[in-house]
């Protein structure tokens, strides 16, 4: 039996631990009550997304594209500059001649156009999303009247609504990115704490010592992380099913939300993959803390710096959401603990896929490093031993039976 156990690979040993922990947690009564917790966090995610979307819009306000003749455009911009000292008017920019295609202008997400102003000063025509052109209707009439010198005689602005614009699409994607980022953070912080509590309980029952004597600590740590990740996916499936049922019952659907740049199917896959990476990264840190703490009280004390670090990482990723390509955003994607959050935000706003392959490989590397470091630290400081000692056949039979 001893010879058989020595031939177990790291993956096989981790699978035994993962299977045991997964069954023990999934069929416990505490897990059923645990599933009720995230309902209260749903409102927080929605509120944070709407607030950040509004802040991004204020930071990069939409521009009114003017496609009138050169003389009308010059008079309109000059009138706008005079009136802007008294009233807040949209920034105007000439894009082409009056033959320009409004659909192509509004589809240009790089220039953040909110609407297109065509026609003449006497008969302006405003093209854009319904809410945007209705908001700018009076301001355009005021500027056109000042530009034409008609005094208090304001022209009738013809409204031509469209489905979307570059500005509304960009703002909507920022909102989608922030909502997904916030949801990812809440799920990770909510579920990662189970790793610590489970390990502290097994330390108190001396189970961890049997596991450490039977298999390498790397396999113990990896198996527990995989088990908790599997339990987390079960929780996400339950919560996602309930949320979908509520949305369908209320007549809402995913089509009503701003679509991410990579599309909803691929974005959902990337969200789950980045959740797994974020969970494994912070879970390995929490697992090391739980292994070092002798009591639950010590866990709470030692985990406080890691929790504060996670909050800082969340604010860093949120700050970089509306400024892709900036040094802050690149730093957030490179730092391993913030990389999953920053990459989820990038998936919502940019369609490129190759950065995600690089980021996932980078994050997987750091997961392996964190697991190896935590296992060695636990073995040297808690077990107070060097290399793995001889394995006990009786203890291994007990583990296999569990």
Image (spheres, rainbow, N blue to C red):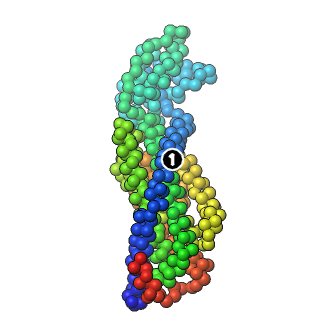
Viewer-nearest residue: 208 or 108: 208
Local packing at callout 1 (Cα closer than 10 Å; few below 14, some 14-19, many 20+) is few
Looking at the rendered image, the quarter that the C terminus falls into is: bottom left
Helix, strand or loop at label 1? It is helix
352 and 95: which one is in front? 352
Q: Nearer the viewer, residue 28 or 163?
A: 28
Name which quarter of the figure residue 396 lies in: bottom left
Q: Position of residue 390 (x, y in %)?
A: 49, 89
In the depicted structure, whether residue 340 falls above or below residue 58: below
Residue at image x 54%, y 9%? 151
On-image quarter of the N terminus = bottom left
The x, y position of residue 162, in whole percent, is: 37, 29
Side of 29 relative to 373 (left or right): left
Identify the residue position indicated by label 1 in the image.
40
Name the residue: 48% across, 64% down.
280
Q: Position of residue 286 (x, y in %)?
A: 55, 65
Q: Is residue 264 left or right of residue 382?
A: left
Q: 233 or 296, which is in the foreground?
A: 296
Q: In this rendering, does residue 181 appear at all?
A: no
With respect to residue 340, does 163 lie above or below? above
Residue 281, placed above or below residue 342: below
The answer to whether one can see residue 378 in this image is yes
Quarter of the image holding residue 133? top left
């Amino acid at each position: 039996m001893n010879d058989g156990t020595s031939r177990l690979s790291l993956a096989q040993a981790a699978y035994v631990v993962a299977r045991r922990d997964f069954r023990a947690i999934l069929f416990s009564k505490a897990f059923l009550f645990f599933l009720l917790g995230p309902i209260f966090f749903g409102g927080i995610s929605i509120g944070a997304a709407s607030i950040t979307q509004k802040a991004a819009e204020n930071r990069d306000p939409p521009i009114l594209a003017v496609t009138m003749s050169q003389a009308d455009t010059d008079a309109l911009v000059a009138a706008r500059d005079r009136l802007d000292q008294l009233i807040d008017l949209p920034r105007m920019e000439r894009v082409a001649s009056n033959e320009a295609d409004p659909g192509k202008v509004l589809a240009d997400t790089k220039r953040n156009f909110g609407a297109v102003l065509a026609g003449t000063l006497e008969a302006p025509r405003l093209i854009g999303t319904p809410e945007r052109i209705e908001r700018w209707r009076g301001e355009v009439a005021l500027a056109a009247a000042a530009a034409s010198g008609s005094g208090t005689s304001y022209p009738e602005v013809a409204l031509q609504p469209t489905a979307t614009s570059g500005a509304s699409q960009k703002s909507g994607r920022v909102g989608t990115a922030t909502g997904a980022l916030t949801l990812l953070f809440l799920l990770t912080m909510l579920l990662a704490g189970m790793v610590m509590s489970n390990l502290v309980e097994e330390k108190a029952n001396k189970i961890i010592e049997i596991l450490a004597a039977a298999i390498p600590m790397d396999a113990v740590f990896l198996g527990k992380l995989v088990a908790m990740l599997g339990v987390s996916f079960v929780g996400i499936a339950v919560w996602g099913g309930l949320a979908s049922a509520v949305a369908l019952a209320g007549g809402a659907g995913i089509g009503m939300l701003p679509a991410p740049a990579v599309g909803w199917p691929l974005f959902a896959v990337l969200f789950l993959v980045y959740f797994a990476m974020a969970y494994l990264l912070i879970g390995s840190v929490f697992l090391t803390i739980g292994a070092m703490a002798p009591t639950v009280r010590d866990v709470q004390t030692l985990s406080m710096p890691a929790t504060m670090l996670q909050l800082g990482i969340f604010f860093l990723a949120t700050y970089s959401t509306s400024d892709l390509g900036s040094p802050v955003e690149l730093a957030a994607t490179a730092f391993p603990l913030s990389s999953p959050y920053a990459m989820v935000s990038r998936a919502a706003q940019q369609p490129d896929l190759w950065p995600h392959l690089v980021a996932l490989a980078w994050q997987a590397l750091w997961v392996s490093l964190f697991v190896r470091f935590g296992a060695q630290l636990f073995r040297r400081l808690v077990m107070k031993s060097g290399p793995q000692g001889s394995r006990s056949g009786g203890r291994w039979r007990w583990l296999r039976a569990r």
